[in-house]
């Protein structure tokens, strides 16, 4: 090998090792991060969720502020200093006066646009602020139903290279709700599930006067539908991470569910520090 080629070889090896070190030193991390954890509502164990996750977050080196209402979103100084907001607040069955008001949403929106991450699971952000379409656009999806009630379903990882789902195999969640959602077609979907059971049955003999308003969706035929379960997206500079798994805290007994959720928290916390990724993944593409 000539001297010149040897020098080129050493430079290649050095550059490769440097890139590996850089990547390792810049993996998403909660160490030193400021986190706001907001919980509330009457379902999905909000207080228990805070009690469960806050010690885990703190063990990773995060500083966590816990609130049981949305008033913190009006604190401009605290919000601007926050790296990640975790919300566990489902507003179904919640009195109107306790739901997120327009001023609070505006504070949340501005923080995320400026780089604060936003994350949660199941109804904690996917069925919260259900009357605000801007909020739903920000999250990237909105809960519609959990047909079949408590059920078992398979989760398929469709992006095995993403830092959140890397080296995680397909898995099954048991005795929990399988969310049917309206979703943004541009989110980066990391995992999906299929509705395999005949959960809504159309009856040709059902008269209009027999239909109770709660049963109006008997017309929906969803068997075979494939639904995003885990996704990420950007809103301004802020990173959004969502998983629809987590009706009960026991869902996090699954090592795959817990690993995905914690990786999602870490990823979402880095909006102010790491380069923005190109994650627009349209379902329908136009070829000109």
Image: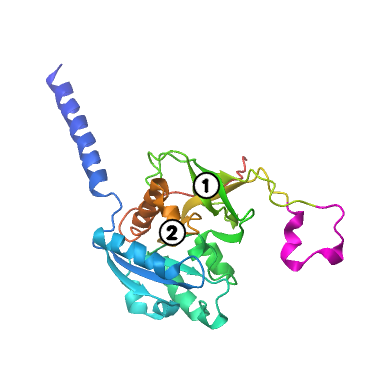
Q: Residue at x 48, y 51 (%)?
A: 231
Q: Is 219 colored magenta in this rendering? A: yes
For label 2, the SS is: helix
Query: How far across and how far down the image is residue 193, in percent?
Result: 56, 45
Q: Read off the magenta span.
A: 203-220
**Which x, y percent locates residue 164?**
39, 47
Q: Is residue 114 visible?
A: no
Asked where in the image residue 237 lies, by quadrant, the reply is bottom left
Disc nearest the viewer among 2 and 1? 2
Q: Say whether residue 166 is visible.
A: yes
Quarter location, residue 82:
bottom left
Whether pointer 2 and pointer 1 mark residues with C-beta atoms closer than 8 Å, the reply is: no
Q: Is residue 170 above or below residue 259?
A: above
Query: In the image, is residue 45 above or below residue 193?
Result: below
Residue shown at 35%/63% (left/top)? 52
Per the image, label 1 sits on a secondary structure element best described as loop
Q: Quadrant of the C terminus?
A: top right
* Quadrant assignment for the N terminus: top left
Q: Residue at x 44, y 61 (%)?
A: 120
Q: Is residue 2 left or right of residue 126?
A: left
Q: Which mark is residue 4?
A: none
**Which percent across, then down, holds residue 153?**
55, 45
Residue pointed to by mark 2: 249
* Residue at screen point 32% across, 76% down: 78
Label 2 crowd (10 A; few <14 / some 14-19 / many >=20):
some
Pointer 1 residue: 281
Label 1 neighbourhood size at 10 Å, few (<14), some (14-19), many (20+)? few
């Amino acid at each position: 090998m000539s001297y010149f080629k040897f020098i080129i070889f050493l430079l290649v090896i050095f550059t490769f090792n440097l890139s590996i070190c850089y990547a390792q030193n810049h993996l998403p991390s909660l160490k030193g991060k400021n986190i706001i954890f907001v919980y509330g509502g009457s379902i999905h164990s909000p207080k228990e969720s805070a009690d469960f996750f806050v010690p885990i977050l703190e063990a990773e080196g995060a500083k966590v502020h816990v609130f049981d209402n949305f008033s913190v979103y009006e604190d401009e100084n605290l919000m601007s200093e926050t790296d990640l907001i975790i919300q566990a607040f489902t507003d179904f069955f919640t009195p109107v006066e306790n739901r997120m008001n327009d001023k609070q949403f505006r504070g949340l929106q501005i923080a995320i646009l400026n780089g604060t991450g936003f994350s949660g699971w199941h109804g904690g952000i996917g069925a919260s602020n259900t009357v605000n379409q801007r909020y739903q656009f920000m999250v990237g999806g909105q809960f519609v139903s959990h047909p079949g009630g408590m059920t078992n379903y398979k989760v398929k990882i469709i992006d095995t290279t993403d830092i959140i789902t890397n080296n995680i195999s397909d898995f099954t969640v048991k005795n929990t709700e399988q969310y049917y959602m309206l979703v943004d077609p541009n989110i980066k979907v990391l995992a999906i599930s299929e509705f395999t059971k005949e959960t809504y049955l159309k009856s040709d003999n059902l008269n209009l006067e027999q239909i109770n308003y709660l049963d109006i969706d008997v017309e929906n035929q969803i068997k075979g539908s494939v639904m995003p379960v885990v996704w990420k997206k950007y809103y301004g500079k802020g990173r959004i991470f969502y998983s629809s798994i987590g009706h009960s805290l026991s869902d996090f007994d699954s090592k795959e569910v817990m690993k995905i959720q914690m990786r999602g928290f870490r990823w979402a916390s880095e909006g102010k520090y790491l380069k923005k990724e190109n994650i627009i993944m349209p379902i329908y593409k136009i070829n000109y």
